[in-house]
Image (cartoon, grey):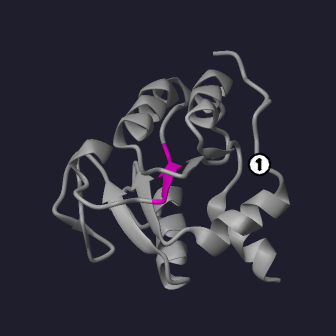
Amino acid sequence: MECEFPTINSNMNEVKEIFESVKTIAVLGLSPDESKASHRVAKYLQMQGFKIVPVYPKGETILGEKVYKSLAEIPFAIDMVDIFRKSAALDAVADACIARGDVKVFWAQLGIVNNEAAKKAQDAGMKVVQNQCSMVDHRNLQA
C-alpha cells in the first residue's frame, strides 16, 4: 500500500475553531477495548465535555453510550466524525457523511489519509483534518 501525504487539511487555527464549535462526535471504529487508541481518544474527548457517539459493528454500549452499527443509524445530528478506520474505507465514510447532510467535520486520525475522500468531504462543505489525533490536538490547544 502506498503512503499518502495529506494535501487537504485544516490548519491549527481551523482545528481550534472546530473544537470550539463541535458538540457531538461520532467515533467511527470506537473499540470497547480500553487499550486501543480509539477508546482512549474517545474517553478523553468525552471527559472534555463532548458528546461521544460510538459507531462499531457490535456491542450495546461503549463508554456508557449507545453503540450504532453505522453513521446512517444515528437518529440525531452529529457535528464531527472522528475516523479510526483504514484509509481505503474513507471513500465510503465520506459518502455516508455526505448522505447524512449534518456532518461539519471529517476527521481522519493519525496515520489515516485519503485525499480523494477528503476532497469529496471538503466539496460537500465539511472541514477536513487528516493524519492528526483529535486528542493530541485538543490537548495542545488547551496548553
Q: Main secondary structure of the magenta part?
A: strand
Secondary structure beneath dot 1 equals: loop
Location of residue 51 by image quarter: bottom left
Q: Nearer the viewer, residue 80 or 37?
A: 80
Q: Is residue 10 left or right of residue 108?
A: right
Q: Residue at x 50, y 46 (%)?
A: 84
Q: Residue at x 16, y 63 (%)?
A: 60
Q: Residue at x 48, y 60 (%)?
A: 79
Question: Is residue 103 within the magenta segment?
Answer: no
Q: Which residues are magenta?
A: 79-84
Q: Is residue 31 visible?
A: yes
Q: Is residue 129 left or right of residue 39?
A: right
The spot of residue 7 in percent (x, y) is 80, 30
Q: Nearer the viewer, residue 75 or 48?
A: 75
Question: Is residue 81 within the magenta segment?
Answer: yes
Dot 1 corresponds to which residue? 10
Q: Is residue 3 above or below residue 48?
A: above
Q: Residues within 10 Å of mark 1 (few under 14, many from 20)?
A: some
Location of residue 120 by image quarter: top right
